[in-house]
């Protein structure tokens, strides 16, 4: 019997003045809020309900779990991200989800399609982990087979800069795990990123 596959969308509750601060500094709080809200909703509509995986929405702040809204109407299971940096929160998801391979994506990559998620799970049939590189040195997706258990894959990762992908890959490879890679996609952090996305 095959294990259930888990897709986890990491997202901040869309509240004016919270989240996407670099984008907000350039375009204003309303534009940043609108981008985040619409992109999260579109990703959920596009990916949730796919019978090939169970979709989870990991939200921050944790209290957002108790405030169902339009975003939560998709067929998803809602869970809190918990405290700590991104590595702490990713590790928590990896350690608390039911058994089965896990793929995590962020809510600021508008180009993610079901084929990307399916390809990640397919890679986890051959590899222990999979990474989707972003063009800024980070990554838009990480997938873990979770067998064997990965010890501290996010320790020492320099988040928010050009080293996150290399740091995470080194942790995984140093643990003796096979790492596969997907295509490079762009996340949206700045006004230039958003303009580039709109013109694609």
Image (tube, rainbow, N blue to C red):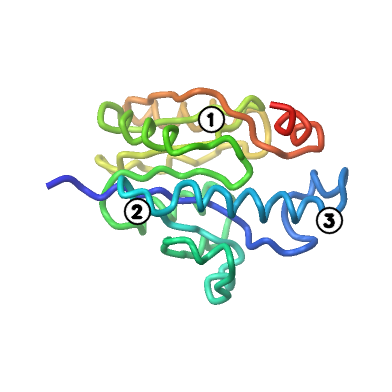
Instruction: Mark 2 or mark 3: name the one nearer the start of the chain.
Output: 3
The part of the image, by quadrant, that contains residue 19 is bottom right
Q: The C terminus appears in which quarter of the rendering?
A: top right
Residue 106 lies, in percent from the top left, at 56, 45
Residue 151 lies, in percent from the top left, at 36, 42
Residue 146 lies, in percent from the top left, at 30, 43
* Tag 1–tag 2 contact (CB < 8 Å): no
Task: Residue at 67% x, 56% y: name it.
Answer: 37
Determine the secondary structure under disc 3: helix
Instruction: For marks 3 and 1, give the CA distance.
Output: 32 Å
Instruction: Mark 3 or mark 1: name the one nearer the start of the chain.
Output: 3
In the figure, is residue 130 to the left or right of 35?
Answer: left
Q: Which mark is residue 29?
A: 3
Q: Is residue 60 above or below residue 139?
A: below
Instruction: For marks 2 and 3, give the CA distance.
Output: 33 Å
Viewer-proximal residue among 169 and 124: 124
Task: Residue at 82% x, 56% y: name it.
Answer: 30
Q: Which mark is residue 16?
A: none
Residue 105 lies, in percent from the top left, at 51, 43
Instruction: For marks 1 and 2, give the CA distance.
Output: 28 Å
**Would you name the residue on which mark 1 appears?**
167
Q: How many marks?
A: 3
* Crowd class of label 3 (few under 14; some 14 to 19; many from 20; radius 10 Å): many
The part of the image, by quadrant, that contains residue 176 is top left
Viewer-proximal residue among 73 and 141: 73
**Would you name the residue on which mark 2 appears?**
54
The part of the image, by quadrant, that contains residue 29 is bottom right
Residue depth check, mark 1 versus mark 2: number of the one nearer the observer = 2
């Amino acid at each position: 019997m095959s294990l259930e596959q888990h897709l986890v969308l990491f997202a901040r509750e869309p509240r004016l003045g919270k989240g996407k601060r670099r984008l907000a500094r350039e375009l204003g709080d309303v534009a940043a809020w609108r981008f985040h809200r619409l992109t999260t909703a579109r990703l959920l509509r596009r990916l949730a309900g796919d019978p090939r995986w169970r979709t989870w929405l990991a939200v921050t702040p944790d209290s957002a779990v108790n405030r169902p809204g339009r975003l939560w109407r998709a067929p998803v299971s809602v869970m809190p991200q918990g405290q700590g940096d991104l590595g702490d929160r990713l590790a928590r998801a990896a350690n608390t989800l039911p058994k089965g391979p896990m793929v995590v994506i962020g809510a600021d990559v508008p180009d993610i399609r079901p084929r990307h998620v399916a390809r990640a799970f397919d890679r986890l049939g051959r590899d222990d982990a999979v990474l989707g590189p972003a063009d800024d040195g980070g990554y838009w997706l990480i997938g873990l087979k979770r067998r064997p258990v990965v010890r501290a894959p996010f320790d020492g990762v320099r988040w928010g800069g050009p080293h996150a992908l290399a740091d995470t890959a080194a942790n995984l490879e140093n643990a003796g795990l096979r790492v596969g890679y997907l295509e490079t996609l762009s996340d949206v952090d700045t006004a230039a990123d958003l303009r580039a996305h709109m013109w694609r």
